[in-house]
Image (tube, rainbow, N blue to C red):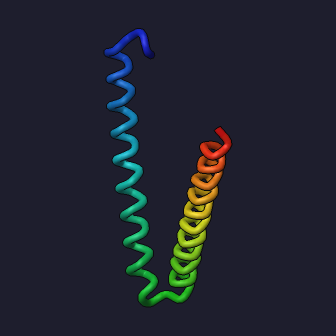
Amino acid sequence: METDPEYAALMAERRAEYNRRHTAKRKADREALEEQAKTDPEAAKKLAEMRKYQSEATVRSYQKMKADAKQETRCYCQI
């Protein structure tokens, strides 16, 4: 792939198109779930679980970022 720039460009284009379609599908599914959650308790429960998972993932990411920054600071101090 690195040796053939045409092939690399083709693969990048295919990957970008896949990502665009996949993102659009996820967005449409989530919007449909949000609409359905207004009347369906089961859909509301699923939406709440999705939001809870995302919130927890955000906290984990932030904690990891802080721990990594702290570790890097320690490394610089030991020089």
* Camera-side residue of 70 and 50: 70
- The x, y position of residue 67, in whole percent, is 63, 57
Looking at the picture, tell me which residue is in the foreground, 53 or 72.
72
Q: Residue furthest top?
A: 3
* Left or right of 63 on screen, residue 12: left
Residue 17, percent from left and from top: 34, 40
The part of the image, by quadrant, that contains residue 5 is top left
Residue 77 drawn at (x, y percent): 63, 46
Q: Quadrant of residue 45?
A: bottom right
Tell which of 68 and 77 is nearer to you: 77
- Quadrant where the N terminus sits is top left
Q: Quadrant of the C terminus?
A: top right
Residue at 57% of width from left, 76% of height from top? 52
Examine the rendered structure and indicate whether residue 70 appears above or below residue 13.
below
Residue 15, compared with residue 70, is above or below; it is: above
Q: Residue at x 35, y 38 (%)?
A: 16
Q: Position of residue 48 (x, y in %)?
A: 54, 80
Picture residue at 32% right of the left edge, 31% below the top: 13
- In the rendered image of this protein, does residue 13 appear above or below residue 20? above
Residue at the image position 36 percent from the left and 64 percent from the top: 28
The front one of 11 and 28 is 11
